[in-house]
Image (tube, rainbow, N blue to C red):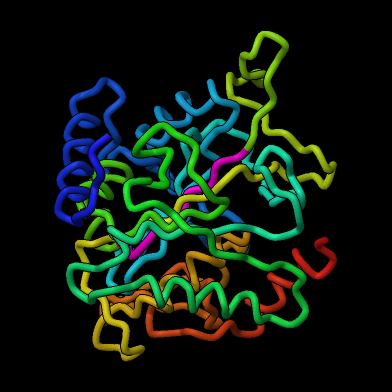
């Protein structure tokens, strides 16, 4: 196997994958083909879309005992009001919330921690520079929340091991996988035309699904794989997460508002990796054309300004999930 060492090599390979996807019969939907109703779900007012690209990935994954549950997008403040902020692989799927299962042998977990990996060759924004230390800092911030018992620890990753099921068809090496900065056309291919203009980053959740004696997925009446719930907590069991950042945008590591702050974006995405959903109302200002959020939180679906510290709602959400985790 040829060892992959340069960002340019990886970027070219990703663009080839985009081209192949767009010539396939399961090519992704355009933005105008996303769920036209853009239903509002829950108190956070998330606009919802459906991606045929993710549906195709989910069908491939089902043969290996997992499925795409959802993709959660972080938007720029100049995104159109009804830009999807949560995207599903199938709009008929029962959308159970997912949770990590401590000590889950299917994840090769031997203790009550989660593991994350960073793909260093792509951990650099074309505009903004090196990001791996910002990724690490965001996990350290979540680990420091006092009322939570969760701990996320970094594992080493070879430079030629792209930790993405979506891009390789292989199970990634960690629970949470920072794939890195992906070319804008890939965001357009997966989430619809113009997605790369407004999407900062995305976290894609895979869940374990029920498999019958023959090794085939067990399907519900609508033909969707049924997620497992081995600990009986009423939530689907999370298998792994992929985190991508959109390299078509400009970033900064300074924490100022002159560009997208990498650590703030990473803190939001890694909140999703810990099963925190979007929080707060998103409202468009007709005078400025900008989106506003209320109340402020790391887990707002729109990044309006740098925010490197979890706020009250963020801490409460994390502790609500992990205060008794062991």
In this view, 274 is above or below 97: below
Look at the magenta stretch and give its main secondary structure.
strand
Rendered image quadrant of residue 77: bottom left
**Horizontal side of residue 180 vs 91, given as left or right:** left
Q: Is residue 83 visible?
A: no
Q: Residue furthest top?
A: 214
- x and y percentages locating residue 268 in the rendered image: 49, 70
Picture residue at 36% right of the left edge, 66% below the top: 75
**Horizontal side of residue 198 vs 292, given as left or right:** left
Part of the protein shown in magenta: 199-207
Q: Is residue 124 magenta?
A: no
Picture residue at 28% right of the left edge, 74% below the top: 130
The answer to which of 252 and 153 lies nearer the viewer is 153
**Horizontal side of residue 259 vs 113, given as left or right:** left
Q: Quarter of the image for the N terminus: give it.
A: top left
Q: Is residue 206 magenta?
A: yes
Total labels drawn: 0
In this view, 137 is above or below 213: below
Q: Quarter of the image for the C terminus: give it.
A: bottom right
- x and y percentages locating residue 156 in the rendered image: 48, 58
**Horizontal side of residue 8 vs 244, given as left or right:** left
- x and y percentages locating residue 265 in the rendered image: 41, 72
In this view, 291 is above or below 113: below
Q: Is residue 303 visible?
A: yes
The answer to which of 55 and 152 lies nearer the viewer is 152
Picture residue at 80% right of the left edge, 37% below the top: 230
- x and y percentages locating residue 128 in the rendered image: 23, 76
């Amino acid at each position: 196997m040829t060892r992959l060492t340069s960002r340019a090599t990886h970027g070219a390979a990703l663009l080839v994958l985009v081209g192949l996807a767009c010539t396939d019969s399961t090519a992704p939907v355009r933005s105008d083909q996303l769920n036209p109703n853009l239903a509002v779900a829950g108190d956070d007012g998330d606009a919802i879309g459906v991606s045929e690209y993710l549906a195709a990935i989910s069908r491939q994954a089902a043969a290996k005992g997992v499925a795409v549950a959802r993709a959660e997008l972080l938007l720029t403040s100049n995104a159109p009001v009804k830009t999807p902020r949560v995207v599903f692989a199938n709009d008929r799927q029962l959308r159970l919330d997912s949770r990590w299962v401590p000590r889950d042998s299917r994840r090769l977990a031997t203790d009550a921690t989660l593991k994350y990996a960073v793909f260093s060759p792509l951990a650099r924004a074309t505009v903004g520079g090196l990001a791996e230390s910002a990724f690490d800092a965001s996990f350290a911030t979540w680990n420091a929340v006092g009322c939570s018992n969760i701990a996320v620890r970094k594992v080493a990753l070879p430079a030629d091991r792209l930790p993405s099921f979506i891009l390789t068809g292989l199970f990634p090496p960690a629970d949470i996988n920072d794939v890195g900065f992906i070319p804008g056309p890939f965001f357009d291919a997966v989430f619809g035309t113009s997605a790369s203009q407004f999407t900062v980053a995305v976290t894609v959740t895979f869940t374990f699904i029920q498999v019958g004696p023959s090794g085939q997925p067990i399907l519900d009446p609508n033909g969707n794989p049924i997620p497992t719930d081995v600990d009986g907590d009423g939530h689907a069991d999370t298998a792994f997460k992929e985190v991508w950042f959109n390299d078509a945008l400009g970033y900064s590591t300074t924490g100022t508002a002159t560009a997208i702050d990498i650590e703030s974006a990473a803190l939001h995405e890694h909140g999703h990796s810990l099963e925190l959903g979007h929080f707060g109302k998103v409202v468009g200002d007709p005078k400025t054309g900008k989106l506003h959020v209320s109340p402020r939180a790391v887990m707002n679906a729109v990044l309006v300004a740098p925010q490197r510290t979890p706020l009250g709602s963020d801490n409460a959400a994390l502790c609500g999930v992990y205060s008794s985790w062991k």
